[in-house]
Image (cartoon, rainbow, N blue to C red):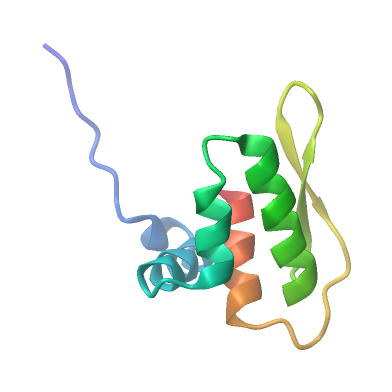
Amino acid sequence: MRKHAVVPPFHALDPELGVAEHLLRKGNPQLCAIVAQLPDEHAAARRLNAVLAEAGARPRLVDTGAAWRIVYVTPRAEAGELAAGAAGLAES
């Protein structure tokens, strides 16, 4: 007999991912442009890194060839909701 795991909403696991979910539901053009690149991970990562840099968020995605890594850079002081949402996507 197969058991099924109960998965809570992502925003319960990571508040920034909850912000990303909220922005995507509202049709945020920057985050929707990232999701629109999928399933091309490299294109989506390039777009996500551009949004992260523009928004002043700290993480960046780096392809190591075997897996994606998150590298942190110094954030801008005025980073806001978009930065939090984009960071949530990067860290998911």
In the rendered structure, the answer to whether residue 54 lies left or right of residue 39 reads: right
Specify whether 76 is left or right of 25. right
Can you give x and y, in whole percent of width and height, for residue 87 in the image?
A: 64, 62
Q: Quadrant of residue 57?
A: bottom right
The furthest residue to the top = 1
Q: Position of residue 82 (x, y in %)?
A: 60, 75
As drawn, the residue found furthest toward the left would be: 1
Out of 40 and 76, give the one closest to the viewer: 40
- Determine the residue positioned at 53% across, 67% down: 16
As rendered, which of 92 and 13 lies closer to the eye? 92
Image vertical order of residue 76 relative to residue 45, above or below: below
Total marks placed:
0
Identify the residue at horizontal 67%, vertical 56% (top origin): 48
Relative side of 25 to 51, left or right: left
**Which picture quadrant has residue 51?**
bottom right
Q: Quadrant of residue 42?
A: top right
Q: Residue furthest right?
A: 74
Pick whichever, 38 or 68, lies toward us: 38
Q: Is residue 25 left or right of residue 75?
A: left
Quadrant location of the N terminus in the rendered image: top left
The picture places residue 44, in percent across and down from the top left corner, at: 63, 46
Q: Is residue 62 above or below residue 74?
A: above
Q: Residue at x 74, y 49 (%)?
A: 46
Picture coordinates of residue 36 (x, y %)? 51, 50
Task: Tell me what residue is drawn at x 69 percent, y 46 percent.
Answer: 45
Q: Nearer the viewer, residue 53 or 10?
A: 53
In this rendering, the answer to whether 55 lies above or below 65 is below
